[in-house]
Amino acid sequence: MRTPRQSPSPRRFSDDPNPDDPLIGARLRYCLAQVEQRLSQALASAGFADIQTAHFKVLRFPPPENERPIDLAQRAGMSKQAMNYLLLQLEELGYVQRGAMGGSTARLVSLTEKGWKVAEIQRATVHQIEREWEQQIGAQRFQTFYAVLKELTDS
């Protein structure tokens, strides 16, 4: 796997023998960027070119189904205002709908039929990426890699 070109660090870390080597957070971010790029390509090829990478903060697993915008914002690590901006865009594009929450001014977010088509394409694309990575590094190594990720994220 290729990592992006690295620029020299203006500052050195005294306790790090190799400060120019990306750590786990950066490497995970590189993998996520690859996945998001492939998702964008697959969606554009399927006629959903209006989906932007920022929209993946909403259109992610698990897909929103009767969720409050504040809960979606917290899950995405962003402000409610930023989430509402994305939700407004996706609602205008026809991917999500917001319905009234019984007796409250709060609104619940769910995918529309069009949004569920996007979710299906995303899931199929990620399955394809997993198969490619498995082929690239070997079935056993991929299964170990996936098992470790699962262990770290299930805790």
Image (cartoon, helix red, strand yellow):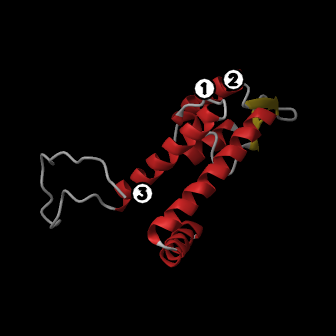
Query: Which residue shows up at 19% across the image and 45% down it?
Result: 7
Residue 139: image location, x then y, percent: 53, 74
Residue 127: image location, x then y, percent: 62, 57
User: Quadrant where the N terminus lies?
Assistant: bottom left
Compare residues 68 and 31 and report the one nearer the observer: 31
As drawn, is 116 to the left or to the right of 14? right
Are there few (<14), some (14-19), or many (20+) residues within 10 Å of tag 3? few
Residue furthest to the right in view is 102
Q: In the image, what residue type sits under mark 3?
A: Leu
Compare residues 105 and 2 and report the one nearer the observer: 2
Compare residues 65 and 121 and report the one nearer the observer: 121
Q: In the image, what residue type sits under mark 2?
A: Leu
- Labelled disc at residue 93: 2
Mark 1 vs 2, N-terminal side: 1
- For mark 3, give the secondary structure: helix
Residue 60: image location, x then y, percent: 63, 46
Task: Please give the residue where the numbered disc 1 appears in the rendered image.
Answer: 50
Query: Which residue shows up at 51% across the image and 77% down it?
Result: 144
Are there few (<14), some (14-19), or many (20+) residues within 10 Å of tag 2? some
- Labelled disc at residue 28: 3
Q: Which label lies toward us, 1 or 2?
A: 1
Are there few (<14), some (14-19), or many (20+) residues within 10 Å of tag 1? few
Q: In this rendering, does residue 55 appear at all?
A: yes
Check whether the beta carbons of the residues at disc 1 and disc 2 lie within 8 A of each other. Answer: yes
Residue 77: image location, x then y, percent: 52, 44
- For mark 2, give the secondary structure: helix
User: Quadrant where the C terminus lies?
Assistant: bottom right
Marks 3 and 1, how far apart in space?
26 Å
